[in-house]
Image (tube, rainbow, N blue to C red):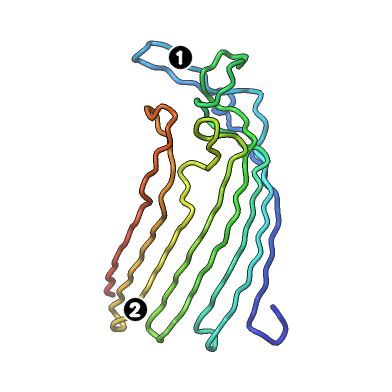
Amino acid sequence: FIEGSTTKARFHAGNSYRAPALYERFGGSYSSFSSSYSYWGDPRLRPERAVAIDGGVDQWLFDSSAQVSATAFYTDLRETIIFDFANFPRDDPFGRFGGYRNSEGGTAKGVELSLRASPAAKTNLQVSYTFTDSTSQTPTIGDDFFGVLGLSRHMFTVMASHWVTPQLNVTFDMFAASEYSLSPFGALGRQILFTGPVKADVVVRYE
């Protein structure tokens, strides 16, 4: 905390490690359609490794009835394990046409903004926004698209809760995300944009 104020500064840094799972190393499957086995694993897989840092500020306002926060983050995925078909090496020693392999990883950076407030004694409000810019060091679709698949760049949440009476509470909760890219099976390596999800709930609770 900054002395003599209601401001808090924070910073975190760390690294992570994940050993390959047994299925990623030795897994396979059987197809009743072709009456054959497919081998997906690779016993040579190296662990996943990442380094991440983040820093932010929390500020309390109006006699602590409101709190605003801002956080910047950066993650460097040094090495990851992926399940790949599109860019699978042709000289695989096990003769696989797809499966688990090590990838060079990528980076993710962005900001998170949030507000928590109690405008009245019986009302609570929470709003948050997250921007994420994630890129892969190897192509994810074709030879020239490096965006991380299935990830929305913008995400927004809002939650409002109000006690109508000491026994009756009403809560509104919404989540929304922007469009994201995928190249599903059958897309022939083409990028397809999907509309991001929007989900809203209203919960009425009586005790």
195 with respect to 142 (left or right): left
State the residue at coordinates (38%, 51%).
196
Position above or below: 138 against 98: below
90 with respect to 116 (left or right): right
Q: Which image quarter is the N terminus in?
A: bottom right
The amino acid on which the numbered mark 2 sits, given as a three-letter code, is His
The amino acid on which the numbered mark 1 sits, given as a three-letter code, is Tyr
Q: Which mark is residue 125?
A: none
Q: Position of residue 147 (x, y in %)?
A: 53, 42
Position above or below: 134 against 100: below
166 with respect to 150 (left or right): left
Reading the image, the residue beneath label 1 is: 37
- Closer to the chain start, of discs 2 and 1, is 1
SS assignment at label 1 = strand
Position above or below: 151 against 166: above
Give residue 200's quadrant in the image: bottom left
Mark 1: few, some, or many residues within 10 Å (few <14, many ≥20)? few
Reading the image, the residue beneath label 2 is: 162
State the residue at coordinates (57%, 61%).
111
Do the residues bearing badges 2 and 1 touch, measured as CB atoms within 8 Å? Answer: no
SS assignment at label 2 = strand
State the residue at coordinates (39%, 39%).
192
State the residue at coordinates (55%, 84%).
61
* The furthest residue to the front: 144
Q: Position of residue 71 (x, y in %)?
A: 60, 65
